[in-house]
Image: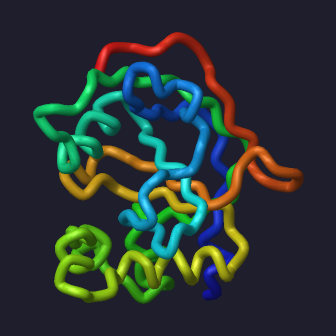
Amino acid sequence: MTLQAHIKTVVGRFWRATFIGQEHHLLSPAQAPRGRWHHSHQKTLYLSGTPDGCRIAVKAYQRSDDPPRRIFPIDVKQARVLDLRKPETREACATTLAEMHVFWADLHAADQHSPTWEVSDAARALGVDGLLTPSRSRPDLTHLTLFEWNQPEAPQVSLAGKPIDF
C-alpha cells in the first residue's frame, strides 16, 4: 500500500491560540524557525481539534511572563492530509507514536534531528497539505498541521467567529 492510500480530506472547525493583540497574525505561519513538524523556516500552520487541544499544545511552551491568550475558531476546507492518528498510516510512514511524541526541542538543543521532521518532509514531498496527529500530551486530542493554505489549489482557512478564553 502506498502513502497515497492514507490521504484523507479534512473539512471542519479547528482552533488556534494566540496572544491578545496578535490576532492579525492568526492565519500566519509559525514564527519560530522550527517546531514539531517544521524546520529551516518551513511554512507551517498549527491548529487543534478542540480548545483544550490548544491549551495542551501551548502548555509546554508557556512562560509565566507571557501576555494573555485567546483561542479562535478556524474553519478549514479541503485539506488533503496524512492521518497519523492511525497506526497503519504511521507504519506506512515508517514512524511510531513514540518517535512522533519525542520532544523535538530537546533533540534540537542536543544538535540532533527530530524524527518528526523526516515525516513532515516526506509528507511535503508527497504533496499533501498537512498532517492530522494525536497530541503528544493527550493522544485523545487531535492537531492539524498545514503546510499550505489560502493559496490556489490549497486548503482554505478562515476565522470562524469570536474567540474564547484561554
Residue placed most toward the observer, 45 or 119? 45
Residue placed most toward the observer, 155 or 34? 34
Which residue sits at x=63%, y=31%? 75
Residue 19 % position (x, y) = 37, 28
Classify residue 25 as left or right of residue 15: right
Q: Is residue 68 above or below residue 55?
A: above
Residue 72 % position (x, y) = 48, 23
Q: Is residue 111 above or below residue 145?
A: below
Q: Is residue 95 above or below residue 10?
A: below
Image quadrant where residue 134 sits: bottom left
Classify residue 149 as left or right of residue 86: right
Residue 119 % position (x, y) = 47, 79
Which residue sits at x=47%, y=68%? 38
Q: Quadrant of the C terminus?
A: top left
Which residue sits at x=37%, y=65%? 36
Q: Quadrant of the N terminus?
A: bottom right
Classify residue 101 as left or right of residue 18: left
Residue placed most toward the observer, 4 or 118? 118
